[in-house]
Image (tube, helix red, strand yellow):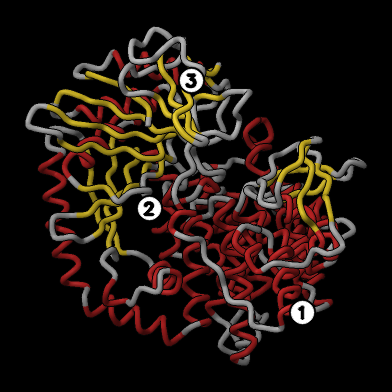
Amino acid sequence: MENLELLCKEKNYSKEDINSFKHALDFSKKYLFSEKRLNGESVYFYNLKIAKYLIESKMSRSVVVAGFLYGLENKISKENLKEFFDGEVVNLVFEQLKLKEIKEKSKSASADLMRQIFFTTLYDIRVVFVRLASKLVNLETMESFAEKEQKRLAEDAVEFYAPLAGRLGAEKLKQKIIQVSFRVINPRKYREIENFLKETYEERQLYLEKIIKEFENFLKGKSVKIKGRQKQIYSIYKKMKDLKKPLETQRDHLAIRIIVENEKSCYDCLGVLHENYKVIPGTLKDYISCPKENGYQSIHTCLELLDSKILEVQIRTVEMDEVAEEGVAAHWSYKKLKTDIGFEKKTAWLKEIFELQKGGEDKDFLESLKLNLFEDRIYCYTPKGDVFDFPKNSTILDFAYRIHGKVGDLATGGRINGNFSSLKKELTSGDVVEIVTNKFQRPRRAWLKFVVTSRAKSHIKKGVKRYEDVKVVRLFPTVKDRKLDFEDLVISEEFPNHKYNLARCCNPLPLDEIVGVIKSYRKILVHKKNCNRIDHSTKSQIHVNWKETFNRPIKIKLKVNERSGILSDILNTVSRGGFVIKEANIKMIDKDYAECFLVVVPREIKEVEMLIKRIEKIRGILKIWFS
């Protein structure tokens, strides 16, 4: 207990907490010391490891005590345990019994096990944290199992338990589960990366020190703490696999974290870095304006350094760093949760999954679970009122295959809220969808490019094989597909499918009075009504309006006087306006002027108008236009 006590003090547990842990430890030893696991280890020592991981994750007192008592539900009655511990702890202990009962009935009942996990969270979500810690200890001590069984357990952990831990904010448990599991799933790659990191450790540490000093010089005068970190073995492997990038050619095994005093300082630092380094396009992620569902907040960006190496940078406040390091779960107090309105939002996805499994097959439930753990969901209806849920960006074709495999195979399009759309059309929550079929239709290989759900992909591959009797190759989006799809700010009822560009001669801004001029096939140039460059008698003029609402990002360009801190001021202004920043960059035009490039996500035209007014007030702004 001495080492655990030091850990408790390090994690700022109170004396009262530590005394409760000692009481639970003694109680566990009395009942579980003589009990042995399959590997011959005492259950008592097994529980010590569970509690240690819960303490490292800064779980509440009751959760840690439940970890010490793990397994006691088989040795003592609920009423007897209540004589020694409060009802909160007792409930946490005995909720685990439901999980274990299912596991003992059938080793193949993984779908049932996952259902029960979610079922129990509806009563007390903290039950899952104890289960996650227990799973981690099992992974570390499963050498008594056959190699095939070890691999199965490890794959199960990566597929279900690690994402579950991440979604609940138990970040440390998640990373450890992934690390231990990967060592079992792919020992050769694990050793290869581990040896590489050991061999290059000193070189990488020296490089980190150099970069930190460089950053400190740029951020001089600002109250910041800069620290370097090594990337996890599994994340390096993922890059090797997904990008087909050999280990020795990867240039970003390192990352920098900058800790600042407040939210404003996050954007100040971001601006300074973007002014002094080349930014890798598409890597700016603003999780401060738009936090992840588990509460994670930070700004992420990737920079190309002077030696062409790529460096990931995270910028966050002290509080944000604590949440990211320890996990949101560490800050969840049960009593507070009962009255926390935000708690329902944090755990609503769990209830959704539980609803999905009612009346469904195990395979379908597991598929839905995988998608739920990673993606936002949308809900769409059939004309009869039946509701189906899908991952975000699902299409009409995904909907067709959800109804039935045959319906998907014969689908030619669909009606969304009564309007005909192609199979590629993405769905939004609340859509009423009717599938249009043709008996001469058959599955197409190209469909694999745009469907999202595993069910649709599986049916398409089978259909293509059935008709073509050739191997289905994996299709990847083209480079063009990966580009951001930007929103037009202007629309015309006469020409809804045309592309609209804002004229640079008069530079119309929301909500100026505007007119459209047809320039070529499907292209319309938008001018101010009083622009002297347009012929007001021309027949090519059309009536256009500013769009009221937006679904996609918009691009903004700014011409500015070159001065230190200009990008920081712009980023702070935009973020304080409540906008999500997708990209931000600056480049010199000449010695006196610079051009800023922003990608933001507004909801309606009034917000864009407000944003322009805020930006115009910044010292050094010369011109604003949209591209």
Answer left or right for 60 relative to 188: right
- On the image, the x and y values in percent for residue 585 come to 27, 39
Residue 91 visible within the image:
no
Q: What's the amino acid at mark 3?
A: Gly
Quarter assignment of residue 432: top right
Name the amino acid, label 2. Answer: Glu
Q: Residue at x 13, y 60 (%)?
A: 307
Q: In the image, which is nearer the foreground, mark 2 or mark 1?
A: 1
Badge 1 element: helix
Where residue 158 appears, x then y in whole percent?
A: 57, 69
Which badge, 3 or 2, comes first in the chain's sequence?
A: 2
What residue sits right under mark 3 in the picture? 516
Residue at the limit of the structure toward the bottom, as seen here: 146
How far is mark 3 from mark 1, CA to CA?
50 Å
Where is 400 relative to 182, above or below? Answer: above
The percent position of residue 528, horizontal first and vertical second, equals 41, 13
- Tell me the quarter of the image containing the C terminus: top left
Residue 563: quadrant of the picture: top left
The residue under label 1 is which amino acid type? Arg
Q: Which tag, 2 or 1, sits closer to the chain's start?
A: 2
Q: Which mark is residue 10?
A: 2
Which residue is found at the position 13% from the left and 65% from the top? 206
Q: Residue furthest right?
A: 384
Is residue 149 visible in the rendered image? The answer is: yes
Q: CA distance from mark 3 to mark 2?
A: 66 Å
- The residue carrying pointer 1 sits among few (fewer than 14), some (14 to 19) or many (20 or more) residues within 10 Å by Cα, namely few
For numbered disc 3, what is the local secondary structure? strand
564 horizontally vs 330: left or right: left
Instruction: Look at the numbered disc 2 and give the secondary structure of its residue.
Output: helix
